[in-house]
């Protein structure tokens, strides 16, 4: 981070957007950046990354899975400004139809305390889908 935080990874993303609080190291899968850039270009609206790379300590503190793709720099939780979770996840499905992880975390009646809804996307080899 101290060396590369402002490095441009794609037209709309910099290293710092994927960083874990308190860590100078950022692991990051290039394919993840490409997927997020595709989503940004498709919707034409800002993509806000709320969680990218996570250290093991941070992952445990936020209740992440012990085998989380965030630990490998292969996952991001994000929302697209002004676009609902279902619409973003449906487009992500077109990018990863037979592999990768896509999780839906809507802000709805069942989750009224969420500040915003978000989508999780990752570049795992297998296919996984869920809604929380």
Image (cartoon, grey):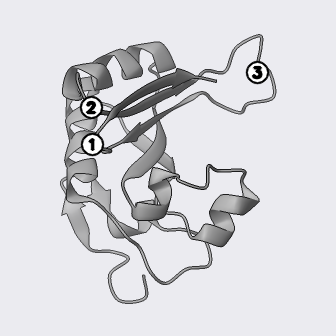
**Horizontal side of residue 132 vs 39, given as left or right:** right
Q: Are the two marked residues, 3 and 1, in contact with CB atoms closer than 8 angstroms?
A: no
Lower position in the chain sequence, tag 3 or tag 1: 3
In which image quadrant can residue 54 be found? Answer: bottom right
Q: Are the two marked residues, 1 and 2, in contact with CB atoms closer than 8 angstroms?
A: yes
Q: Which residue is mark 1?
A: 125
Evaluate whether residue 92 shows in this view: yes
Residue 84, image x, y percentages: 49, 17
Q: Which residue is mark 2?
A: 99
Residue 51, image x, y percentages: 53, 52
Lower position in the chain sequence, tag 1 or tag 2: 2
Measure the alpha-carbon separation of dots 3 and 2: 27 Å
Q: Are the two marked residues, 3 and 2, in contact with CB atoms closer than 8 angstroms?
A: no
In which image quadrant can residue 102 be found? Answer: top left
**Tag on residue 68?**
none
Q: How many marks?
A: 3
Q: Which residue is mark 3?
A: 111
In the displayed structure, 38 sits above or below 43; it is below
């Amino acid at each position: 981070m101290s060396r590369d935080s402002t490095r441009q990874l794609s037209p709309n993303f910099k290293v710092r957007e994927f960083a874990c609080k308190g860590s100078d190291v950022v692991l990051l899968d290039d394919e993840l950046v490409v997927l997020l850039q595709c989503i940004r270009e498709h919707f034409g609206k800002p993509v806000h990354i709320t969680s990218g790379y996570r250290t093991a300590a941070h992952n445990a503190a936020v209740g992440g899975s012990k085998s989380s793709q965030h630990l490998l720099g292969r996952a991001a939780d994000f929302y697209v400004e002004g676009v609902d979770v279902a619409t973003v996840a449906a487009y992500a499905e077109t990018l990863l139809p037979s592999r990768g992880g896509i999780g839906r975390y809507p802000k709805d009646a069942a989750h009224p305390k969420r500040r915003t809804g978000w989508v999780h996307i990752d570049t795992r080899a297998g296919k996984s889908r869920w809604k929380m």
